[in-house]
Image: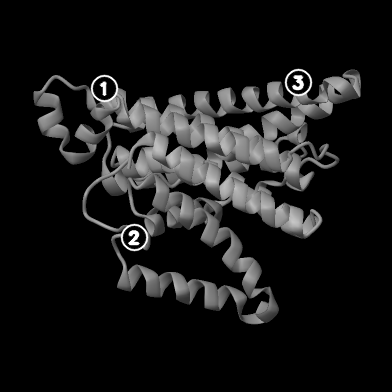
Amino acid sequence: MRGKEKIFLLLAIVAAIGVSLASTAFNRYYLGIAIDVGINIILAVSLNLINGHTGQFSLGHAGFMAVGGYFAAKLTLVFGPMVPTSAQPFLFAGTLLAGGLGAALAGLAVGVPSLRLKGDYLAIVTLGFGEIIRVIFQTSDTFGAATGLTGIPTLTSFAWAWGLAAVTVYVVASLVNSTYGRGFIAVHDDEIAASAMGINPVRYKVTAFVVGAFFAGIAGGLYSHHKAVISPGGFDFLKSIEIVVMVILGGMGRTVGVILAAVLLTILPELLRGVSEYRMIIYSLLIIAIMLTRPQGLFTLSKKKTA
């Protein structure tokens, strides 16, 4: 499926959810879930660039999300009182960009020394990076230490979350389908053959990490301004696993499948709230069953690789 077709699909999903929200008089509960879905789409699609298209295995995506979330929230708390209400959207856009750039720098920092590694070794390094980031924020008084940051203005709206989700899908799909982006696929398929053809695998891996980390930082900024409170516990190892499951469930390298998986895995826990005492058990068993019966991804329709 081409990039334009994916954008049309995503816009159709946005329109469908928008109609649903309008029919429920913009119920705050459903609106909150819709925003969560948009944020998770950004996280899943950005990780899919690293794990799916480039063939790496990162377990530190929550760390990049934390960098973006904390930086954006801190900037808003510092400069927000100085900015008039009419200029709040511009401040929000600036803090999101700053959070994304901070996460991109973190991605560069972890990418350059570690991306000569492969497979399990890379996964261990990225896992350690994510934990280091979490501990840094947990011990930093500037960022609220263990209690985190509170009183963050709730500036994230449905339009912000889904608009940036559409931008993320468009950028990643366009990058992968471009002439330059074919290098990601080459590195994914065979690094040795790619090197023999003059492609530098490390450069493409670092590029994927930086771009993926940037959008994870954007998602973190949206998350912090949606929940109004963030703490280090919200960006732990389990959060990274949750994002990885979205990518695996949707099909590695399948953008549309990853989007649908992000929607499903955001809504499913909410549907299981009626059996709250068994919710996580049922949720986990469903994921295990899907992985056993559809290891290639729940939304993979064919073996043909699509972007």
Query: Circle 1 sits on which residue?
Result: 179
Q: Is residue 233 visible?
A: no
Which one is in front, 217 or 258? 258
Which residue is at 14% across, 25% downward?
Answer: 195
**Quarter of the figure that contains the C terminus:** top left
Q: In 3D space, how far apart are the residues under numbered discs 2 and 1 (Cα atoms)?
A: 27 Å
Q: Amino acid at mark 1?
A: Thr
User: Percent from the top left, x then y, of residue 214?
Assistant: 52, 29
Q: Do the numbered discs 2 and 1 sit on residues whose CB atoms are within 8 Å?
A: no
| Label 1 residue SS | loop
Q: Is residue 27 visible?
A: yes
Which residue is at 51% across, 56% downward?
Answer: 242
Sooner in the amino-acid sequence: mark 3 or mark 1: 3
Quarter location, residue 297: bottom left
Q: Amino acid at mark 3?
A: Phe
Task: Give the crowd class for mark 1: few <14, some 14-19, many >=20 residues within 10 Å.
Answer: few
Which residue is at 31% across, 67% downward?
Answer: 294
Sooner in the amino-acid sequence: mark 2 or mark 3: 3
Using the image, tell me which numbered label, if any, was put on residue 206.
Answer: none
User: Percent from the top left, x then y, of residue 7?
Assistant: 47, 38
User: Percent from the top left, x then y, of residue 169?
Assistant: 47, 37
Vertical arrangement, residue 259 with respect to residue 216, above or below: below
Which residue is at 35% across, 47% downward?
Answer: 254
Using the image, tell me which numbered label, if any, was put on residue 297.
Answer: 2
Sooner in the amino-acid sequence: mark 2 or mark 1: 1
Q: Amino acid at mark 2?
A: Gly
Which one is in front, 239 or 155? 155
Query: Circle 3 sits on which residue?
Result: 90
| Label 2 residue SS | loop
User: Percent from the top left, x then y, of residue 261?
Assistant: 47, 57
